[in-house]
Image (cartoon, helix red, strand yellow):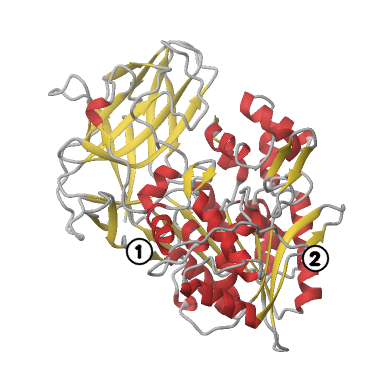
Amino acid sequence: MSQPHNDGVSIFTAAQLSRIAQHGIYTSSTSLDPAAGHFAEALIATLDGTAEQPVLPPDLQALTEEVRQRAIIGFPRITAADGVQLSAHTIRLKGDEPRPVVIVPSGWTPLGWALFEYTYLRLALRGYHVLGYTPRGIGLTMPVPGKGYVDGPFTSGGTIDVAGPADWADGSTVIDYAQRHFGPSGIAFLGESYGSGISQLVAAHDREGRVDAVVALSTWGDLAASLFQHDTRHLAAVTALINFTGGPVERKFDAATRQILADFQAGRNLDAVVEWGKKRAPSAYADKTNAREIPTLLSNAWHETLFAANQLIEHFRALTVPKRLNLWIGDHAAPEGAGLTIPFSGPNQPVEEAFAWLDHHVRGVDNDVPAWSPVSSQIMFTYETRTDPQTGKDEIVTPAARESSRSWEDVTTSTERWYLAANPSDDRDGALTTDPETGWERSFTAGMLTEATAVDAIVTTGQAEWNGTPKTYITDKFDRQNLAVWSSAPIAADGQGGAARRIRGIPELTLAVRSSARSTTLVAYLFDLAPDDTARLITHEPLTLADLTPGQEHSATWTLQAAGYDLGQDHRLMLVLTSKDPLYSDASVESSTTTITAPDGGAYLTLPLG
């Protein structure tokens, strides 16, 4: 066994933990807060006895020492079937009592398994053996002048298979190792992000069906749909992942995967890209999961920019096993990321529910899990916040409300149509009304970025949202030359808790479009417009139209991403259509003209209510 190097680990303070808890573990879509990494290293140095002095606050020093007394710590390299060495970390509880093991494949991060050391300690103190490992190819790979490259201590060998068959086989090899070294009474997989997809896929494919439960946080159901939906490529998400592997592309991916990524970025051979993504989709193997009756907890965020919610909802609906779907405020990894990494003054609900799921389904604990509803939706933005007088930052005083449903179908209890129409009192914008109207049109110049975008940045915009500061849009800055707007009149409260509308489910948009070019992209944004004309995003979704006949009308219908949102009293709905968003590819031709109009029966937004 080999131990990670922990030379020069600095002392970690409670103030640093508080800062990460308030702001999250990411400083950008491709960078972790260095303090989060330092904290993990301090935990590991204390756990393996290489810290020459106390490097943790006293309570965490005591927690780590307790695990050292109760367990045997290891840092093995597990050899995969093809000889690749996987960096791993084990916590084996002492004693003869049979105990389950929780296996944690790491996320897509240069720190590999190390980032979630705090979670491993908590799991051990709950009575689990723990085995964390870095999937093949993941982890920091550093250039050495004149000597090529050297891997970091938490890095696994091989190249990244992007949750492909090699990762499934590696998961079974890791299970073999766990059975030999722990003799566990049960086996569970817990993963976040990349590790969550691998967890589901290993559970479905393990040759002996040895996985007893799965927790998949910030996860996907259909990787192909996450990357390419409505004929639009999710370019920014893939670029962020490529830039966050911890090393150069030519070392992190084999030639075949580099070709897939290059084709995706260039927009060519997309049938092959989709086939590649479908092979890595847990939804493609739902029948296997169902046949094995694997209890599965799925978790995601409404404003997820890597694995948008609709594809996961479809996967959830296809599962017939004991299941739970949690949908949270925020973006990728925001709800649970800090909770897996550092302690909080109070519970991190996504993580606590993950632990409760494992306790019931693997340890047999008689807890509240059997009484949980299959669907839990956290409602945007029903938390109460206050501004910290010292930092000037908003902080959450009362958590956002959550609602329970017996199924996804029960989330939406009714729908209503809001028709796009002309607005006689406003030359700039159209109206959203309850009556259909035809004979109008609104045009804008395509191919230009505007102030209407889904996020300022992948991950961090949603991280701020989770922490109480959703993005605010100044709608007067929306350049009507490059987009089109339709707004409703102020909406009175509906009598249910003071909300003007309880938006619950998947909206749908129907309209007609003409373009002066042979192709265009439409990006639809649905906003909550406040009386002061500032707005917050409810949901959005792009659609790309190719092979158009210039000047000829084309009908289009597409779904926006699911939402759980309470519209405030006397607020308005605002629908914005643009042709470009930094998250996505687009087929809009710069300086071409896009014209929106109503087909027979009207152009309308179908709004789901609950």
Residue 63: x percent and y percent? 53, 76
Q: Name which residue type carries label 1.
A: Glu
Residue at 18% x, 43% y: name it. Answer: 571
Residue 112: x percent and y percent? 65, 53
Nearest to the observer: residue 593 or residue 469: 469
Disc 2/disc 1 C-alpha distance (Å): 47 Å
How many marks overall?
2
Above or below residue 62? Residue 204 is: above
Q: Quadrant of the C terminus?
A: bottom left
| Secondary structure of residue under mark 2 | loop
Residue on which disc 1 sits: 403
Nearest to the observer: residue 512 or residue 15: 15
Above or below residue 158? Residue 208 is: below
Residue 13: quadrant of the picture: bottom left
Residue 505 appears in the figure = no
Residue, far bottom: 96
| Secondary structure of residue under mark 1 | strand
Residue 542: x percent and y percent? 45, 32
Residue on which disc 2 sits: 1
Residue at 33% x, 22% y: name it. Answer: 483
Q: Quadrant of the N terminus?
A: bottom right
Mark closer to the chain start, 2 or 1:
2
Nearest to the observer: residue 90 or residue 572: 90
Crowd tier of the residue under label 1, counting other residues whose Cα lies within 10 Å: few below 14, some 14–19, many 20 or above: few
Residue, far front: 52
Residue 194: x percent and y percent? 62, 51
Residue at 79% x, 75% y: name it. Answer: 181
* For residue 212, side relative to residue 173 (left or right): left
Residue 254 appears in the figure = yes
Residue 474: quadrant of the picture: top left
Crowd tier of the residue under label 2, counting other residues whose Cα lies within 10 Å: few below 14, some 14–19, many 20 or above: few
